[in-house]
Amino acid sequence: QFADTHIIEALVASGFGIAGLPRYTAALSYPGQIVLKQLRGSDNNRSIFILMRRDRAERLAVRKVVGLVQEVARTITAR
């Protein structure tokens, strides 16, 4: 767990996976390299986004992980 979102953004931009961050904490220090995708299906009155490299955002594996995270978010809010 990192407290500095800039470190998280640098890791994502370097290709070390994806990250979940609250929307307004992501500074997007790497324009054109990383993108924010809104985590839908969560009714927690917060907008949660998944940060990923732009060139990997449309990969099947990444889309599957995003879908799984969204599914988990729906089950959490259904409790």
Image (cartoon, rainbow, N blue to C red):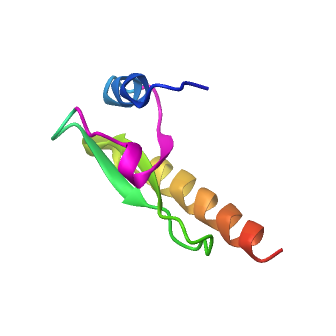
Say which quarter of the image contains residue 2.
top right
Dividing the image into 4 quarters, which one contains the C terminus?
bottom right
Vertical side of 16 occupied by 36: above or below:
below
Compared across the picture, whether 6 is left or right of 78 comes to: left
Which residue is found at the position 26% from the left and 44% from the top? 54
Q: Could you tell me residue 10's position as x and y percent? A: 34, 24
Q: Could you tell me residue 33's position as x and y percent? A: 22, 36
Task: Choose between 17 and 45: the one closer to the eye.
Answer: 45
Which residue is found at the position 36% from the left and 26% from the top? 6
Which residue is found at the position 61% from the left and 57% from the top? 69
Compared across the picture, whether 41 is left or right of 27 comes to: right
Say which quarter of the image contains residue 30.
top left
Q: Could you tell me residue 47's position as x and y percent? A: 47, 64
Task: Choose between 11 and 79: the one closer to the eye.
Answer: 79
Q: Which residues are magenta?
A: 16-29
Dividing the image into 4 quarters, which one contains the N terminus?
top right
Vertical side of 57 occupied by 14: above or below:
above
Specify whether residue 58 is in view.
Answer: no
Task: Choose between 39 and 27: the one closer to the eye.
Answer: 27
* Extreme residue in the right direction: 79
Compared across the picture, whether 57 is left or right of 69 comes to: left
Specify whether residue 68 is in view.
Answer: yes
Vertical side of 18 occupied by 40: above or below:
below
Q: Is residue 17 magenta?
A: yes
Q: Could you tell me residue 48's position as x and y percent? A: 49, 58
Report the number of discs: 0
Which residue is found at the position 61% from the left and 75% from the top? 43
